[in-house]
Image (cartoon, rainbow, N blue to C red):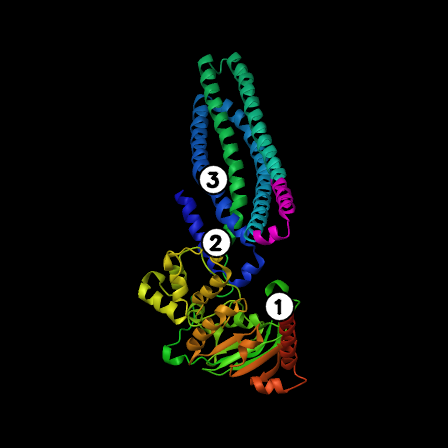
């Protein structure tokens, strides 16, 4: 268990150090399977099976030594069978190594499917797809079973061949020993002793065969673990320049940025995009769906690096800055609520450098600043209320409002009842800070100092809200008119 614990700690640490692009290409289910099933298998090989293997090796060495002591001639004859047996074991080992990797990959696919469907159970149930998803899972499990049967047949074949070889060896000893006795080169007592040692060696060979097959399985599973543990992230997590507080003003610039996501390099998100946000100002970014609004934030947080161009803060390329320091100085609010399965107080303190050092008074103060203190106190356990995974134990609007604490803009998912309170709190927090609003709801940008409109992989318009609205042919005017029309339609539907 100590070995499994150490492997899991190293693996989890390595996973969390990887760049965001790694998680775009690797499913959560696969990583969970590596952390659970693969580490358990490798741990079993390195503990129980390793001790059995070492015992078999020691037993074989002692047995062979005694065989040579009793009769070097007969011992040399018996050991002629070792090279063919070793060759068979190597061939079988290669197959076992390969099939073990396939089994672990198949298990990872099964875990991925289960994790995805369980985490989205409400959607599955809303569409009545329970039986469909069960059938998909059964098919995945059948794939694992099919491979496991192949592995079992290989195991049985290897052990059967080794057992047969041992029996042939014993018969050969009887035959050769009889000839030596007939020629007075060996006594009955010596032959009996030799047979006992030969049988002892035979048992150890069967044990070594079992150990070897388990070792190949462990190596097959361990290959993925070693790859993950040894994988170096594309950029370090906590290395680079750290600016002094007086050096940080907050001017942001995207300079001739071209970018495509690693998983779809053939589809550019930005092409030669340039955007400047002066220090201490509020800029709203709008655009059609898929224009790359959220990607701007991902680049600013250095979740990804541009393919060309650069992102700068106060004139410094963020690739030269310490990523951990950079992110600690940028507050973000995601469009969807992000809450962890712990208490409200722990969720509020999560963003602190050391959450364990956050005092109750500081948590209460944060809640008051965000206009959320009263409704949190309305829970039976107040700030000690456990919110559940992703805030599932809270109502939707409370989860959305509370998520603002985690990442100190108004999420588009907030209802009108809470939007005013949250917006008011955020306006206080934004004073004197550089703010980039990714606006999915255009009504939230009226008070921004400037507006940038994204389309066709670049900034197509920028200026003040009133200035852009006055341009009848501009994209911003069209987006505003479209949203106003949709809102009017919704009002009419509601009135009916």
Q: Which residue is mark 3?
A: 45
Q: Which quadrant of the figure contains the N terminus? A: top left
Q: Which residue is mark 2?
A: 229
Q: Which residues are magenta?
A: 121-144
* Mark 3 vs mark 2, CA separation in Å: 18 Å
Q: Earlier in the sequence, mark 1 or mark 3?
A: 3
- Disc 2 crowd rating (10 Å Cα; few below 14, some 14-19, many 20+) is some
Q: Position of residue 174 (x, y in %)?
A: 54, 17
Does the image show residue 142?
A: yes
Residue 57: quarter of image: top left
Q: Nearer the viewer, mark 2 or mark 1?
A: 1
Which structural element holds mark 3? Answer: helix
Verify whether residue 416 appears in magenta.
Answer: no
- Judge left or right: residue 269 versus residue 13: right
Which structural element holds mark 2? Answer: helix
Above or below, comparing residue 103 to residue 247 in the picture: above
- The tag on residue 494 is 1
Tag 1 and tag 3, C-beta contact below 8 Å: no
- Judge left or right: residue 415 versus residue 272: left
């Amino acid at each position: 268990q100590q070995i499994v614990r150490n492997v899991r700690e190293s693996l989890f640490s390595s996973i969390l150090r990887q760049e965001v692009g790694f998680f775009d290409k690797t499913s959560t289910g696969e990583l969970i399977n590596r952390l659970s099933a693969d580490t358990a298998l490798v741990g079993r090989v390195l503990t129980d099976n390793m001790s059995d293997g070492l015992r078999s090796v020691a037993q074989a060495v002692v047995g062979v030594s005694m065989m040579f002591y009793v009769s070097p001639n007969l011992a040399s004859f018996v050991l002629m069978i070792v090279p063919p047996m070793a060759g068979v074991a190597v061939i079988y080992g290669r197959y076992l190594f390969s099939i073990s990797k396939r089994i672990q990959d198949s298990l990872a696919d099964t875990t991925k499917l289960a994790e995805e469907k369980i985490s989205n159970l409400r959607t599955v149930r809303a569409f009545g797809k329970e039986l469909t998803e069960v059938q998909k899972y059964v098919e995945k499990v059948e794939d694992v079973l099919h491979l496991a049967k192949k592995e079992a047949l290989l195991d049985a074949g290897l052990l059967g061949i080794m057992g047969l070889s041992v029996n042939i060896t014993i018969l050969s000893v009887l035959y050769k020993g009889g000839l030596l006795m007939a020629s007075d080169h060996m006594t009955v007592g010596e032959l009996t002793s030799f047979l006992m040692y030969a049988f002892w060696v035979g048992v150890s060979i069967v044990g070594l065969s079992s150990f070897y097959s388990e070792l190949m399985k462990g190596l097959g599973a361990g290959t993925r673990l070693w790859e993950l543990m040894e994988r170096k992230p594309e950029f370090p997590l906590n290395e680079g320049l750290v600016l002094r507080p007086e050096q940080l003003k907050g001017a942001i610039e995207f300079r001739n940025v071209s970018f495509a996501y690693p998983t779809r390099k053939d589809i550019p998100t930005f092409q030669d995009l340039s955007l400047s946000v002066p220090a201490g100002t509020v800029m709203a970014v709008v655009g059609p769906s898929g224009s790359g609004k959220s990607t701007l934030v991902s680049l600013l947080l250095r979740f990804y690096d541009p393919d060309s161009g650069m992102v700068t803060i106060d004139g410094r390329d963020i690739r030269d800055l310490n990523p951990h320091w950079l992110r600690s100085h940028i507050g973000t609010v995601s469009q969807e609520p992000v809450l962890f399965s712990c208490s409200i107080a722990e969720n509020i303190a999560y963003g602190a450098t050391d959450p364990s050092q956050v005092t109750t008074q500081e948590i209460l103060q944060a809640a008051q600043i965000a206009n959320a203190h009263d409704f949190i106190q309305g829970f039976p356990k107040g700030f000690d209320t456990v919110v559940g995974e992703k805030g599932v134990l809270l109502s939707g609007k409370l989860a959305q409002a509370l998520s603002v604490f985690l990442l100190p803009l108004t999420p588009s998912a907030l209802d009108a009842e809470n939007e005013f309170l949250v917006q008011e709190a955020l306006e206080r927090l934004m004073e004197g800070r550089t703010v980039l609003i990714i606006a999915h709801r255009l009504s939230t940008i009226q008070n921004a100092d400037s507006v940038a409109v994204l389309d066709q992989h670049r900034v197509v318009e920028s200026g003040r809200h009133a200035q852009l609205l006055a341009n009848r042919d501009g994209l911003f005017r069209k987006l505003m008119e479209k949203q106003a029309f949709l809102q009017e339609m919704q009002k009419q539907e509601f009135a009916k």
